[in-house]
Image (cartoon, rainbow, N blue to C red):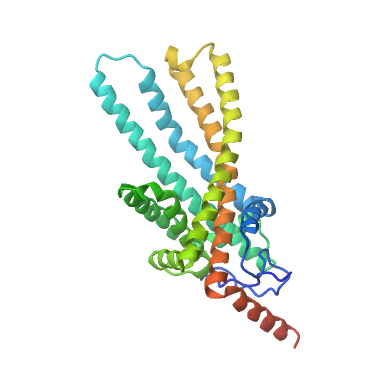
Amino acid sequence: MSTVTAPAPPVGLPSLSAGPGSGPVPLRPLAVGEILDGGMDLLRRHPGPTLGTAGLTVVVQLLITVPLWWAITGLLSRQSSSLDADILLFLLTLTAASVVAALGSTVAAVITSAAAAVAVIQEAAGAPTSLPVCWARLRPLFGKLLLLGLTLTGLNVVIAAIPIVGYFVPLFGGLMRLSVLALVFEGGTIGSALKRSMQVGSGTAAGLFRQLGIRLLAGAVGGFLWFIMMLPLTIIATTLVQLAVGGDPLVNGDHGALLLLTVAVAFAYYLPLIVVWAFRSGIDTLLYLDGRMRGEALDVEWGLAGRRSRAEGGR
């Protein structure tokens, strides 16, 4: 089976010249099952860039969100005579936590998808795909990726505010996340990457519905994976905390017990996201490549490049 040879890399990534047979993606438009299976396959083949990167982003998320969650649980459990002030403080804290969670999730998805894309590039070149190597290749783009994460978060908020259309923000957000792959594979500015994401993901009506349908399936798979891991972890974590403190921390209001409960629940919530974000990063990468092969005949371009590479190597 022929395989991908050399996606056009941005400045800072090495030129790829490996011939067919060395790459990770079939050199043809992909079926739905191949994309879903490929998301898991990339996770297994490249645990460092996928699971490792997702794990690092989860650690950052925990360090930021645990204090906010602790404040929220403290407000819920404390006794106070100033009810109006407590409600206002609770709403402000909850809003801050929601904003941080939304921004953190988007940035985590951006960074993890970019790392998965670099792993595919490295594998196609026959180069190492370890986490340190992929991070070194990704470092020149890190500032742009963070700015892109902020931009995508802002766009998601704007879309969510539009009546009716806002219900579809996960789908539009997923489509715009192809800009991460455009930035890694093609380079350019954030604006050009966003434009390319629309071109690749919605070049035709059929292509748009196909992308959105696959994202719905991938979202359902990811949600199921998260739930079946989160539920037992939450039950175990909260039970252990209650046994350790001798009661329900939300009832007795002990700050130390509340902190322990917050950390336990946050751990149970975020740990499964490592697998989910890694899986979705593979899906994003394959959807980008599939979109370009279907809409821009990228598979033909890669095939010709592979033949030229082999011809030059045989001289």
Residue 53 visible: no
Q: Position of residue 76 (x, y in %)?
A: 37, 21
Q: Position of residue 125 (x, y in %)?
A: 66, 69
Q: 231 and 47: which one is in front?
A: 231
In this view, 227 is above or below 200 = above
- Residue positioned most to the front: 206
| x 47%, y 62%: residue | 208
In this view, 87 is above or below 299 = above
| x 42%, y 30%: residue | 69
Q: How many marks?
A: 0
> In the figure, is residue 125 to the left or right of 161?
right
Q: Position of residue 198 (x, y in %)?
A: 43, 64
| x 46%, y 45%: residue | 105
| Quadrant in which the C terminus appears | bottom right
| x 55%, y 55%: residue | 214
Q: 212 and 6: which one is in front?
A: 212
Residue 220 visible: yes
> In the figure, is residue 111 to the left or right of 69?
right
